[in-house]
Amino acid sequence: MTTRRNFIKTSAFASAALLVNKSDAAELKLHQNSFTPSKPIVLSTWNFGLKANEAAWEILIKNGKALDAVEAGVKIPEGDPTERSVGYGGRPDRDGRVTLDACIMDENANIGSVACLEFIKHPISVARAVMEKTPHVMLVGDGAFQFALSQGFKKENLLVEASEKEWQDWLKSSNYKPIVNIENHDTIGMIALDANGDLSGACTTSGMAYKMHGRVGDSPIIGAGLYVDNEIGAATATGHGEEVIRIAGCHLVVELMRQGKSPEDACKEAVGRVVNLTAKRKKNLKDIQVGFIALNKKGEYGSYCVQSGFNYAVYDANGNNLIDADYYLK
């Protein structure tokens, strides 16, 4: 039988338990809201990002600057003659000329860019020189080349034998129809958060294989192929550059993160813009690949792309890992 005394005693225990549960919940909520930033951390596009990340990590783990890390990282594929879509060894345009595009951006919104640059193995370093040693933000073509020479960069033949042979074979039909995730696999973009909590990014490419001479994609365009806001986050893109330019893709991703979206959700919405515009223009989405990676100030990251096949590399305290991005066309 429940007496009045037992009822009061039981109620007291229940109330105490409720207070404990509320306290635990409040503590859990406080813990969730005080997310400890994952830093340093570096992200880069595609599987060659693994080696690039290693070079960047060597700087980041020693409390180096994100700017130095991203430059050192992307120079790895730039200097690899077996890598057919970035720097030395990149596929040429339809005239047989290897032309390179790159840009770099630091935590203070300092930017540098080069486009349609020939004969220089590391366009990312030329882009940084534009940022640090000129009053401009972009140099193109012969002007960029002459500037590079003035800064001590060496003129080199970038058309390796394998790429030249592919180009000669292509000339037999001259059919320009880039294959998704092959000729579209044309960029390394890298974004990093250093131990000091500062963000920087770099993006470099030899562009679409067999493009018209003078064609420039999104990679050297700040706000399209790369964007960094040190208060919010950073993003970089890969794939069909014309489609990324059409939506000012990376600036869009960062602005969506500013509005409170997670990095992955921001990338997903940007891809949605590409999808919608492709439909409006009555183009075939299956011929297009666009992928974004994003990193916010907390060290949270994410990605999204149009169709399967895009992956990205992440190096943080858990090691260097390759991740397959989620995608729209299923």
Image (cartoon, helix red, strand yellow):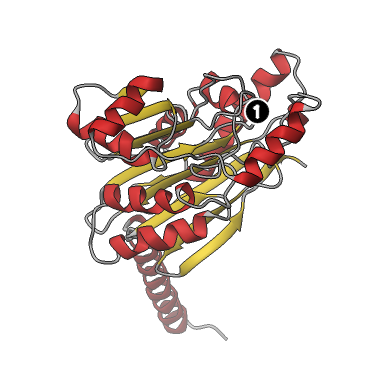
Q: Would residue 95 be found to the left or right of residue 139 on screen?
A: right
For image coordinates 32% across by 44% down, the residue present is 200
* Percent coordinates x, y for residue 169 in the rendering: 76, 35
The tally of labels here is 1
* Percent coordinates x, y for residue 58 in the rendering: 33, 65
Most distant residue in the right direction: 173
Q: Say if 47 sits above or below 7 in the image.
A: above
* Percent coordinates x, y for residue 136 in the rendering: 24, 21
For image coordinates 75% across by 18% down, the residue present is 283
Judge whether residue 111 can be spotted in this image. no
- Write down the residue under mark 1: 210
For image coordinates 76% across by 14% down, the residue present is 282
The C terminus lies in which quarter of the figure? top right
Q: Residues within 10 Å of mark 1 (few under 14, many from 20)?
A: many
For image coordinates 29% across by 33% down, the residue present is 149
| Closer-to-camera residue (269/77) | 77
* Percent coordinates x, y for residue 175 in the rendering: 78, 24
Q: Amino acid at mark 1?
A: Tyr
Most distant residue in the top direction: 281
Q: Say if 37 sits above or below 99 in the image.
A: below
Determine whether the residue tagged by mark 1 lies in a helix, strand or loop.
loop
Q: Would residue 318 be found to the left or right of residue 194 on screen?
A: right
